[in-house]
Image (cartoon, rainbow, N blue to C red):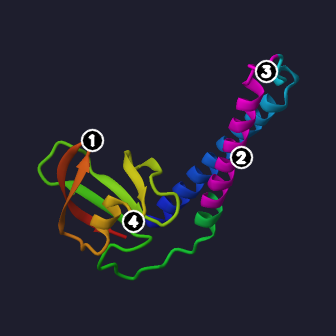
Amino acid sequence: MNRQNVINLLVNALEARFKTARSAALQAREAAVNEESVAETKYDTFGLESSYLAHGQSQRVIECENDWLQFSRQVPVKFAVIDKVCLWSLVRLVPVDSKLASRFFFISNIAGGLALEYQNLPLVLVSPATPVGKILIGQEEGECVSITISGKLTEFEIDAIQ
């Protein structure tokens, strides 16, 4: 479990998300300004709908770019020993008596909800304001927490904090 590797993975994923959003926004803009989008009748709303989509996509690009830039510029706190889960913690949870796989959570106030894989296990970026974030913040290694996954309450042990 290497926190810096996870941070690099997250920065790369956020950059890819930004590039995908930018590409979608360009496509939506091209559709909105295309000559075929000009209304032929007063009931033809394709051009108007395309412009709304282009605007929404451009807003998404701004959000994705901000997440990526903020996360990549953030200097994570270097911990000698982490006693409790806090902002910028990488947490590994192991199910107590379930056939579920272990999972990783990274606590960040940026881009919460992003889901990836790390060491072939689920990795989710959670903010301290989310239900999972609220449960994890302040917990110590070895403690048990109950988290709802796929509608089922599951008990996990905090196996490691970095």
Q: What stretch is highlighted in magenta?
A: 41-67
Left or right: 113 in relation to 55: left
Closer-to-camera residue (84/27): 27
Q: Mark 4 points at which residue?
A: 129
Amino acid type for the residue under numbered disc 1: Ser
Amino acid type for the residue under numbered disc 2: Ser
Residue drawn at (44%, 48%), measured in percent from left and top?
115
Between the residue at mark 4 and the residue at mark 3, the CA separation in whole angstroms equals 47 Å
Q: Which of marks 2 and 4 is nearer the N terminus?
A: 2
Where disc 3 sits, the SS reads loop
Q: Mark 3 points at which residue?
A: 42
The label on residue 58 is: 2
Residue 120 vs 124, above or below: the answer is above
Q: Mark 1 points at which residue?
A: 150
Between the residue at mark 1 and the residue at mark 3, the CA separation in whole angstroms equals 47 Å
Between the residue at mark 2 and the residue at mark 4, the CA separation in whole angstroms equals 26 Å
**Quadrant in the picture for the C terminus:** bottom left
Figure quadrant of residue 105:
bottom left
Callouts 2 and 4 close, C-beta under 8 Å? no
**Quadrant in the picture for the N terminus:** bottom left
